[in-house]
Amino acid sequence: MNRPGLAAVLAAMLACPLGCSGEGSSPTPDGLDFSALMAPDDTAGALPPRQPYRARDGARLHYRHYEADSPVWLILIHGSATDSVYLQRFANAVAGAGAAQVVTPDLRGHGPSPGRRGDIAYIDQLEDDLADLVGHLRSWGGAGRVIVGGHSSGGGLALRFAAGEHGDLASGYLLLAPYLGHDAPTARPSGNGWARPNLWRIVPIAAANALGIRWFNGVDVLYFDLPARYRTGRETLAYSYRLMTGFGPADYRSAFATLDAPALLLAGAEDEAFRPERYAPAITPHNAAVDIELLDGVSHLGLVMRDATAKRAVRWLDALRQPVD
């Protein structure tokens, strides 16, 4: 079939509403404890104002800076559908301990002023944005050793960054319950009713991309069931194909196999989003140097709210800091 003919078939398939797929039903999202996404209380510490930086395409993007007396800078990436605010408690704990200056970006397509919410211009744009943020921090704040980390899908993006063309910009990686991919051993088949992929759209778009056709990459293909009581107006409840694809590792196996920087992976033993007991068996055959630790009694979203998580990250960051001082 020639490309115009294929495009017509794809367009017809993409016109199918979300309800055409079993993934398009609306299950009650009772598998995750979303209370961690509520506005943090006073014990979480101050929420810094958003600061701007310019990406290579001229876009004005934003981040929050948790200051510390440290030459180490930790760029901590938020997970799917939300923005950087819920990382406030963890970021304050790490910065307050003097382990690192913490920067929490609002990724392109997310946050209170996203431009095109839920979309990016091309699949690798989030990686380019992070590289531009590193450049900004080094020119503006004199950032020395840079660690890239993230929670959930943010951890998946950190891993994608490590395996990509900008990976040498970071000296280490902090992965908090990272998303490794829909086909990884850590994935749960049901997704607990949280993320709903529309396979009627994803499959043909992926096939088109394999043929070099990018026309449909801006179509929404992934939807999030965030309960209304946890919504703030900053959430992003639908992702385009290119954002969904760019917000996680292309292949976690090769990403870990080529990772030669220090890496710490923390996850809750009670994680409801992923299968935490499968992180080590999935990763160690590809990179035995990755430090993997499960925290007892900790859930997926609760991971960034627990003092134990921050304390473990602080110890790891302090060890990395020694050659810099």
Image (cartoon, rainbow, N blue to C red):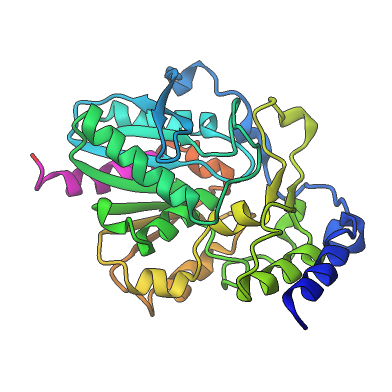
Q: Residue at x 33, y 53 (%)?
A: 173
Residue 312 in sight? no
Question: Residue 191 at x, y = what percent?
Answer: 71, 59
Q: Residue at x 19, y 49 (%)?
A: 320
Whether the magenta-drawn stretch holds residue 303 is answered as no
Question: Residue 199 at x, y = what percent?
Answer: 78, 66
Question: 149 or 244, which is in the foreground?
Answer: 244
Q: Is residue 218 above or below residue 38?
A: below
Please tell me in which quadrant of the rendered image residue 97 appears. top left
Magenta residues, start to end:
308-324
Residue 5 in sight? yes
Question: Residue 301 at x, y = what percent?
Answer: 58, 43
Q: Is residue 15 above or below residue 230?
A: below
Left/right placement of residue 217 relative to residue 185 reads right
Which is the main secondary structure of the residues drawn in magenta?
helix
Whether the magenta-drawn stretch holds residue 310 is answered as yes
Question: Residue 306 at x, y = what percent?
Answer: 47, 38
Please tell me in which quadrant of the rendered image residue 241 appears. bottom right
Question: 209 or 4, which is in the foreground?
Answer: 4
Q: Is residue 77 above or below residue 233?
A: below
Q: Quadrant of the N terminus?
A: bottom right
